[in-house]
Image (cartoon, grey):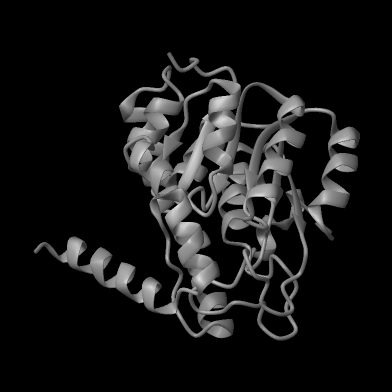
Amino acid sequence: MRLWQHFKLTSAISRLRRASPADLKRWISTLPVVAFAPPVLGAVDALCQTFPNTTRDAAQKVAAEFSADAHLHSEVESRMLRKRGRRMDWQEWHRFLYGAIRIMCPRVVFETGVFDGHSSSVILAAMARNAWGELVSIDLPAVDEIPDSTHRMQGGTSLPQGCDPGWLVPDYLRERYRLRLGDSKELLPSLLTQYGKVDVFLHDSLHTDEHQSFEYRTVWPHMVEGGLLLSDDIFWSTAFHRFAREKRVNYVNLHNFGAIRVGSQARQ
């Protein structure tokens, strides 16, 4: 067995051991979705599929740019070690997210579910390179564990003591950061009215079927043509997959992270 296969199997067994009855019920309900989901892609392939006019060389360049950002990595890692006692676990979807922001150069990005601020840091780093854009983040602070949101976080299911959401975001990236604390059900509609149009939306808050559906459907009319609707933990419920079918759009799958391009080719 290859090392990466062994790691995936070990990780899956570990998750099963920690799973609650509710987790097991949810996983069983999403098995049909997992079976018919698009194939898992790496960051570069996902960027090429999402942005057909982007060459593979250009996609590889922005993905490599993220990996080579020593300033970002050192800042984030030092904060993680200080507060969490561990190193940052960068994943393929982080590289994709960074590359998407670099390619699109969006004016406004909305994000729900900040927690430590992993994705916020990635988005803001790409915006700094673009010298353009504003990140509006909504978060209900996880002072304690939040079921269906933070309860499966590895290395900490609540914010470190004395830390606010987004504590991981380096100081030099905060100029474009607009953090709003509260429930997205209350804040998202009013903020969307205030901003009008959104280029990129990232869901990473409460991963229940009802809440995910609410966020996708609320933001969709405000998305610009060619914009991106992104979601983490797309296999926690069937909401993301049902939404894609409902809107007759394709999506890319980066191992439990999904991306829909507004105006993408309809399913046949």
* Residue at left offset 50%, top offset 72%: 21
Name above or below for residue 56 compared with residue 238: above
Quadrant for residue 139, please give it. bottom right
Residue 41 spot, x, y in % from top left: 33, 40
Quarter that holds the C terminus: top left
Residue 238 falls left or right of residue 214:
left
Name above or below for residue 148 compared with residue 37: below
Q: Is residue 60 at all visible to an observer of this figure? A: no
Q: Is residue 2 at all visible to an observer of this figure? A: yes
Q: Toward the viewer: 47 or 264?
A: 264
Residue 236 spot, x, y in % from top left: 52, 54
Name above or below for residue 249 compared with residue 75: above
Residue 165 falls left or right of residue 81:
right
Residue 71 spot, x, y in % from top left: 51, 61
* Residue at left offset 47%, top offset 39%: 99
Name above or below for residue 149 compared with residue 131: below
| Furthest residue toward left | 1
Residue 258 falls left or right of residue 57:
right
Quarter that holds the N terminus: bottom left
Quadrant for residue 160, please give it. bottom right
* Residue at left offset 30%, top offset 73%: 13
The image shows a total of numbered marks equal to 0
* Residue at left offset 46%, top offset 17%: 267
Residue 53 spot, x, y in % from top left: 43, 17
Q: Toward the viewer: 213 or 69?
A: 213
